[in-house]
Amino acid sequence: MSTILEIADLKALAKRRVPKLFFDYADSGSYTESTYRANESDFSKIKLRQRVLVDMSGRSLETTMIGEKVSMPVALAPTGLTGMQHADGEMLAAQAAEEFGVPFTLSTMSICSIEDVASATKKPFWFQLYVMRDRDFVMNLIDRAKAAKCSALVLTADLQILGQRHKDLRNGLSAPPRLTPKHLYQMATRPRWCWNMLQTSRRTFRNIHGHAKGVTDLASLNAWTSEQFDPQLSWKDVEWIRERWGGKLIIKGILDAEDAKLAAQTGADAIVVSNHGGRQLDGAHSSISMLPRIVDAVGDKIEIHLDSGIRSGQDVLKAMALGAKGTFIGRPFLYGLGAMGKPGVTKALEIIRKEMDTTMALCGKRRIEEIDHRILAENPY
Ligand code: FNR
């Protein structure tokens, strides 16, 4: 643990411990991965403004996201197949987030079900919705999330059709995974991962299995999943989803100011400026570079969160300085989970918290509410 100092250390450890096809699944972006790379590199182009001899005592990172108190403005993003990084991964990550005081978002494509995660946690978590062609299934999911007392529904808007990830195709990854001798070899060379899976994994896509029409076994689940994302989904659908849900709604996957305006008109509580971690439209701008114009367009109408490319506490502060009220992390917590299970997720959050705290102090600020564009340097060099 003492040699793990930054998110990159967790990534390196996860790479050693998680079978290649599952590590690559988390680590990949779509097509040439140019947007995936830009998400990270554009953060480093933004420079912070050092201030000195400012009283730095009594610092706090506490704030709110959609009105919920958080110990720092960093939620765990919804990630499908999280349980492939570590057995029971969704439940472990949810517990780590709960203990840390930040929101956890469960993906529709998770391995543990809504009910599994609800039974493993005490406080409400957030549920991410993919709208499938099977609308009865979607309504059933919304009702299950309500019954589990989820406190927000995160509607993902940027995946009506799947961006191709070359690594997954080359590795032969499918959902659910169909294992070949090559995969079995990769797993055999990762004994810790196999041991974890053997110990605890009893779950297979329980959000979907048995809840969607005709999905009774792995083969039917595979066929159902591959044809389910709905290319006809449109802004009109947000209305019935919002009505059925009746609670806090976050629209995730906004990268354009015009879309941000449409999202604000739906009456949603927040948007997430996101390009799905560079996994959808390759060639799109990084999330952080699009944030200022989205803030200009709707910053006074709707709460704005950001994800894609955050790898440090400095990145979180840069997003907040440009107008985000909160952020999400995907891969940083997945690397932690793959590296060490629940303590690894906690470690990822601790790393980001410590970086945020130190950076905020060196910028001469003590509280999250004081963070704005004035912590950024005007000149790039
Ligand atoms: C995702 N993401 C995602 N988003 C979503 O709405 N539903 C999902 O099921 C998934 N699945 C998923 C799997 C994996 C392995 C990754 C890496 C990402 C996107 C995710 O919520 C988030 O937008 C990005 O992960 C943010 O980028 P970073 O933090 O990973 O750079």
Image: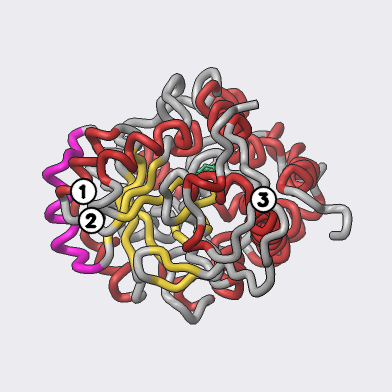
Left or right of 366, for residue 109: left
Q: How is the image coloured?
A: secondary structure
* Region of the chain picked out in magenta, as a range: 232-247
Q: Nearer the viewer, residue 127 or 304?
A: 304
- Which residue appears farthest toward the bottom when viewing the image? 122
Residue at coordinates 54% horizontally, 25% vertically from top-left? 169
The answer to whether residue 176 shows anywhere in this view is no
| Discs 3/1, front | 3
Q: Which residue bears the numbered disc 1?
A: 264
Q: Quadrant of the C terminus?
A: top right
Horizontal and vertical percent position of residue 180: 64, 34
- Which dot marks residue 51? 3
At label 1, the amino acid type is Ala
Vertical side of 209 occupied by 308: above or below: above
**Dots 1, 2 in contact, CB < 8 A:** yes
**Dots 3, 2 in contact, CB < 8 A:** no
Element type at marker 1?
Answer: helix
Q: Which residue bears the numbered disc 2?
A: 268
At label 2, the amino acid type is Ala
Please name the predominant secondary structure of the magenta segment in the image: helix
